[in-house]
Amino acid sequence: MRVDFALLLHATAEHIELTAIAVGIAVVIGVPLGAYLNRERFLAGPVLALVGVIQTVPSLALLGLLIPLLGIGEKPALLALFLYALLPIVRNTHDGLGSIDPSALEAARGMGMRPSQVLLRIALPLALPVVMGGIRTSTVINVGVATLAALIGAGGLGQFIFRGIAMVDMPTVLMGAIPSALLALVLDGLLAWAERRMIPAGLRAEN
Amino acid sequence: MAAAVVMQAVSKRFGQSWAVRELDIRIEAGQTVALIGPSGCGKTTTLRMMNRLTEPTSGRVEVLGQDIARTDPNVLRRRIGYVIQEVGLFPHYDVRRNIAVVPELLGWDRRRIHERVDELMELVNLPPAEFAHRFPRQLSGGQRQRVGIARALAADPELVLLDEPFGALDPITRESLQDQFLSLSRRLKKTFVLVTHDIFEAVRLADCVVLLREGLITQIATPAELVRKPADKFAEAMLGRHRYQLSLMTVTLRDAIASRGTHPKAASAPGDPAAIELSADLSIWDALDRMERERAERIRVREGEQTFLLSRGELLEAAR
């Protein structure tokens, strides 16, 4: 079997692009949403349930449902990926902020920090390990779901998988499947590394 | 004397129940005042209404001459030190940054903040060279609370609020921190308002004790007055079985001389090896402690022109 490296590289780049954009938007929207839900307790239940329901829609079905709305191509694929990435990020931000030692928040308020300062200087840094956990989960999920994007013409490593299935050609299937599995591992590892660098020294376990 | 805090007819209702009702308190500048009472008496609520962490349902609170309902609560809080039982240090900040929080909020320049933090760390006996870059999890409970106190003093506030600051510490650490607090509060010309449920703490640390019960003030008095003349059954119950001990702690040698009218003994026994000389400001409790440690039978106290000689028995009698 001959491997077309240029094609493989191109598909991998598309795959990374889809995942990165979708997770990026999910972070930009999900972290503030999680923080907001942590303040407006009464909204947290319904909104988290709604975001959770989206997660239960089979990915194939979701892509299909979006075709009449957005057609085919990158747009519906990105929307679907974004929706899948949302739950882990929103929920982890909400839970992470909720699990902070309340005395630190009480002290921050008592010393005259404004609510935005309490959130940005104290609450979010303390919740960061949990928030990053959500982002990593979203990324791994998205690398997997993004293989399906090929079905609606958004490209990515899924192209090899579906072509291989259609041609009953296992090597071609693997040409999509193996890089996509590796990609999930590599991105997760990269984020783990970033997490270690971002998490403040005072929170690390070693003494 | 100027008042640091004035509360007028202050009430606070949570849902259907009143946490405090029609409270009138005046706290003089430079004093240490203890708010004391059993759980649910409203002492913490009262404290939190002084920096607007809790808003009164009605009434007026004046802090450092300002009606605080009309101030920006964040600006107000930066002018008031605040210490809580759980300390609430920021675990992701090292000691230096924890102490620097309020000066940073106030926009001090970096060098001034650095110098101020060094000064405060020395003040609470945490040498900067050793502790400045430690994180809260690398400190003992007592060290954390000392950082908490340094942090509250950082921007040199005139008023410091402390909510059961020593409540979570083991007895030995607590006593040592109380001693340090006492010498600190005497040296610094600041107003301290302290919430506690420990009558010994209140008596040791405060110039004035406010006794609260079910949201009402039952007595405002100096520790000595409270011990000598509890206003009602409730105040007596707060003193409990420890009244005599508390009396030993609050009656000074000066009081003892005044009340007993002990006949002066001019320095007739300067060579009396059994007598040690003590300051008239000491409490009988401390005097007895010194006598025990130095194996003295009598003490000499100079008061004005006269010198008095007091025996252990006379001291014990004076506290009755």
Image (tube, coloured by chain):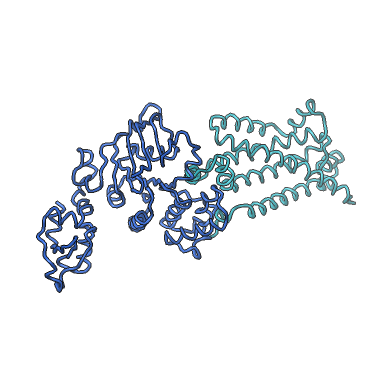
Chain colours: A cyan, B blue
Residue B9 position within the rendered picture, expressed as x and y whole percent measured from the top left: 34, 31
In depth, the one of A12 and B228 nearer the eye is: B228
Q: Quadrant of the N terminus of chain B?
A: top left
Indicate the quadrant where residue B294 lies: bottom left
In the displayed structure, does residue A2 sit left or right of residue B44?
right
In depth, the one of A195 and A186 nearer the eye is: A195
Q: Which residue reaches farthest left?
A: B263
Q: How many marks?
A: 0
In depth, the one of A118 and A28 nearer the eye is: A118
Residue B86 position within the rendered picture, expressed as x and y whole percent measured from the top left: 43, 48
Residue depicted at 61% across the width and 44% down the height: A131
Q: Note whether residue B285 is visible.
A: yes
In the displayed structure, does residue B155 sit left or right of residue A155?
left
Residue depicted at 69% across the width and 49% down the height: A188
In depth, the one of B70 and A16 nearer the eye is: B70
B111 is higher (above) or lower (below) than B192? below
Residue depicted at 39% across the width and 32% down the height: B60
In the displayed structure, does residue A182 sit left or right of residue B148?
right
Residue A193 position within the rendered picture, expressed as x and y whole percent measured from the top left: 67, 54
Residue B25 position within the rendered picture, expressed as x and y whole percent measured from the top left: 33, 38
Residue depicted at 29% across the width and 38% down the height: B212
In the displayed structure, does residue A21 sit left or right of residue B96?
right
Q: Note whether residue B173 is visible.
A: no
